Image: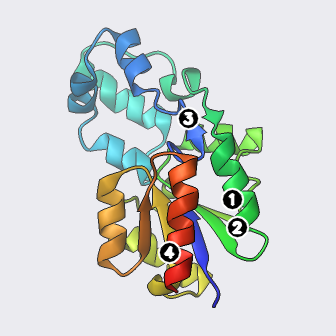
């Protein structure tokens, strides 16, 4: 039976990807205040409805000071979790492996230019799809494009909310903790099929 693997990017293949603590510190605010000033604009950024520059214009209005730089690009400097990369390479020998990621334009193009997405057969990025996890339509979009049923899919993500929403539509899902436990859980799921 053909299996599709969908891997999240940040926190699963990439480490040190969350630049919001650094940005908040740089702006002299708490992370909580960052999201208060962001409001609905952060979701719009992830869904590709606005770009990073528009986000910072809107953020500045609530923050009360003009943010002069595109801070998501300035402070984004992720690494790769080698153990996850090795698992993906191994899975690709007999399965299709795609990336399903919530991202924003500057992060997406940074990773694209670094070749970080090259390991995947296809990349489904929220900012290009116009929809983000945990919305069930995010998963349905990927399943429809790939022509595969939820029960023939294994989804790996580090956010419980995303795992739960994928499971609700019938996708086998694994909450990522580390590469060793991931390897074991994939083995267990494969034996069940």
Residue picked out by circle 2: 91
Q: Quadrant of the N terminus?
A: bottom right
Whether residue 8 appears in this view of the structure is no
Q: Residue at x 63, y 40 (%)?
A: 81
Q: Quadrant of residue 76?
A: top right
Badge 1 marks a residue whose secondary structure is helix
Given contact means CB atoms under 8 Å apart, are the residues at marks 2 and 3 in contact? no
- Where residue 20 sits: x, y (%)? 40, 27
Badge 4: residue crowd in 10 Å (few <14, some 14–19, many ≥20)? few
Instruction: Tell me the distance, in whole angstroms, between the alpha carbons under discs 3 and 1.
Output: 16 Å
Disc 4 designates what residue?
Answer: 189
- Say if 54 sits above or below 75 in the image: below
Query: How far apart are the alpha carbons under marks 1 and 4?
Result: 16 Å
Taking the spot 28% from the left edge, 25% from the top edge, the residue there is 34
Q: Secondary structure at mark 3?
A: strand
Q: Residue at x 51, y 24 (%)?
A: 70
Q: Residues within 10 Å of mark 2 (few under 14, many from 20)?
A: some
First along the sequence among labels 4 and 2: 2
Please tell me which residue is depicted at 31% across the width and 41% down the height of the picture: 41
Report, in whole angstroms, how far the alpha carbon at label 2 lies from the one at label 3.
20 Å
Q: What residue would you read off at disc 3?
A: 15
Q: Name the residue nearer the viewer: 100 or 129.
A: 100
**Which x, y percent locates residue 48?**
46, 52
Mark 1 nearby-residue class (10 Å; few <14, some 14–19, many ≥20):
many
Asked if the residue at tag 2 contacts the one at tag 1, i.e. Cβ–Cβ closer than 8 Å, the answer is yes
């Amino acid at each position: 039976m053909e299996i599709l693997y969908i891997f999240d990017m940040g926190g699963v293949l990439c480490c040190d990807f969350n630049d919001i603590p650094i940005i908040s510190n740089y702006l002299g605010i708490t992370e909580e205040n960052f999201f208060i000033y962001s409001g609905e604009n952060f979701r719009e950024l992830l869904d590709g409805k606005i770009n990073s520059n528009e986000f910072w214009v809107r953020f500045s209005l609530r923050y009360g000071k003009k943010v002069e730089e595109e801070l998501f690009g300035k402070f984004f400097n992720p690494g790769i979790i080698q153990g996850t990369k090795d698992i993906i390479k191994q899975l690709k020998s007999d399965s299709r492996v795609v990336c399903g990621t919530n991202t924003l334009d500057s992060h997406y193009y940074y990773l694209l230019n670094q070749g970080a997405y090259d390991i995947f057969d296809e990349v489904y990025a929220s900012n290009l799809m116009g929809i983000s996890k945990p919305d069930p339509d995010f998963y349905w979009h990927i399943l429809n494009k790939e022509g595969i049923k939820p029960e023939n899919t294994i989804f790996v993500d580090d956010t419980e909310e995303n795992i739960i929403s994928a499971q609700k539509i019938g996708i086998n899902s694994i909450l990522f903790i580390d590469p060793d436990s991931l390897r074991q859980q994939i083995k267990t799921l494969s034996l069940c099929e």
